Image (cartoon, rainbow, N blue to C red):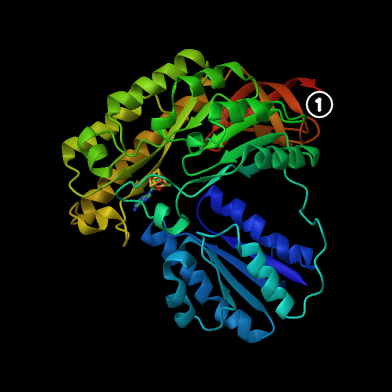
Amino acid sequence: MKLHVLSFGCQMNEADALELSYPFLARGFEPCAVLADADAVLVNTCTVRAHAEHRAVSAVGRLEAWKAARPGRLVVVAGCAAERLGPELRRRFPFVDLVLGARSVEETPALIARALEERGAGPAATDVRPPPGISAYLTVARGCGFACAYCIVPSVRGPDRPRALDRVLEEARRLADGGARELVLLGQTVNGWKDREGRVFADLLRALAEVPGVLRLRFMSPHPLFLDEALAAAMAEIPAVCPQLHLPVQSGSDRVLAAMGRGYTCADFLSRVRSVRARVSGLALSTDLLVGFPGETAEDFRGTLSLIDEAELAGAYCFKYSPREGTPSFALADDVEPRVKEERHALLLERAEGRRSAELRSWVGRSVEVLLETPTGGRTPQFHPARFASPAGAPGTLVEAEVTGCSQAGLLVQAARRRPLP
Ligand code: 5AD
Ligand code: SF4
């Protein structure tokens, strides 16, 4: 029996999809890349923008013929769009066997297990989790405790639920024992992690850095409000923490930031960024930018363009505002004309691409440490992809390399010397 997984959206969804696949694997399913060969399909949907939801829902619709070809096949739809649309999805697609929301993702593996048992699947094997990759996601918090005006995440993923330190450490040890060398900590506002004993995110980083085998730590996505001195200090002091931050700012206009309910001004954002830069050399900072929020003027937009340069960004993901039902800003008129949104989006992309190219070019001629994910490729501490012309070592090895050139895809590098695993 074979399982095909289709995951849309963010890294969190990718990590969830992996977790939701375990009950299948425990009952003898094997992962399978080709839908036509599969007996079950798991669709993990996204709803952050209308376009993302539409793509995910269309993918579900296309499964009707796949299921009809062999009616014993199983269709499971999970994730954020499943949470938002629940009953509507069941009505529109009666061939779907199970619709599971993202809010209670902790409980969904049990629901999948029950559905499989009802269909006569045998007893579950105890641990079937496949070995992790060299770089592995580790969810440290679920849900979101903010209420940014445009964002549907809090309503589909529920309130912020940080995982207990022991649970996170246990999973980190399992991943590292299985061969992971880089852990990417995931949470909607990951650096807001805290526990009942009063430990904060900087403490979590220090504890994870002690796990044997862990060479690198990254985290996504931090919220500017939690980027405090303690975190800046932890980033500077813990060698395993990479000099890289993907810190969503959303807008470079104080007026728009206030309307979004982000809780900071451009000056706050820049001063927090400067404080990290002052301590962490070679920091690569990227961000998310949202254009066309209700009421965004040409001047607001110019603020966003100039923030890209002021913050010395190494890159940005740029999105056009998409009104989402159930969010605070849904009540506001979506009054930035589509043509204007399009133009602003294109300008942002161009500026962000320009910054990314400049960042990559700035590394040419310098040396970098590459964590190999394949014999010929890996990432630098700044998260830039690095490619060797010939095999440079075993995956999981850190390799000192010279940067000889770059392309839009990343850096071209040449091995200098190798460092064995600890
Ligand atoms: N419209 C457009 N972009 C959005 N994002 C979140 N909600 C919306 C929306 N309604 C963007 C934000 C966020 C990223 C994950 O998606 O920039 O940081
Ligand atoms: Fe959405 Fe804001 Fe929470 Fe991020 S912090 S998930 S943008 S509500």
Q: Is residue 32 visible?
A: no
Whether residue 379 is situated above or below residue 401 in the rendered picture: below
Q: Is residue 145 left or right of residue 69?
A: left
- The x, y position of residue 274, in whole percent, is 40, 18
Find out if the beta carbon at label 1 lies less than 8 Å from the nearest ligand 1 atom: no
**In the picture, residue 378 is in which quadrant?**
top right
The C terminus lies in quadrant = top right
| Nearer to me, 254 or 393 | 254
Label 1: which secondary element: loop
Residue at 80% across, 55% down = 127
Q: Nearer the viewer, residue 183 or 83?
A: 83
**Residue placed furthest toward the top:** 278
Q: Nearer the viewer, residue 278 or 145?
A: 145
Query: In the image, is residue 116 above or below residue 6?
Result: below
Q: Identify the residue shown where x is 42% and y is 37%.
A: 316
Residue on which the image places disc 1: 421
List x then y, in percent, for residue 68: 62, 86
Q: Quadrant of ligand 2?
A: top left
Q: Position of residue 343 (x, y in %)?
A: 26, 47
What is the quadrant of residue 407 in the picture?
A: top right
Look at the image and tell me whether residue 316 can be seen: yes
Seen in the image, is 325 located left or right of residue 163? left
Q: Is residue 395 above or below residue 83?
A: above
State left or right for residue 359 relative to residue 122. left
Query: Would you say 243 lies left or right of 291 here?
Result: right
- At 19% across and 51% down in the image, what residue appears? 336
Amino acid type at image mark 1 = Leu
- What is the x, y in percent for residue 247? 44, 33
Q: Which quarter of the figure is the N terminus placed in?
A: bottom right
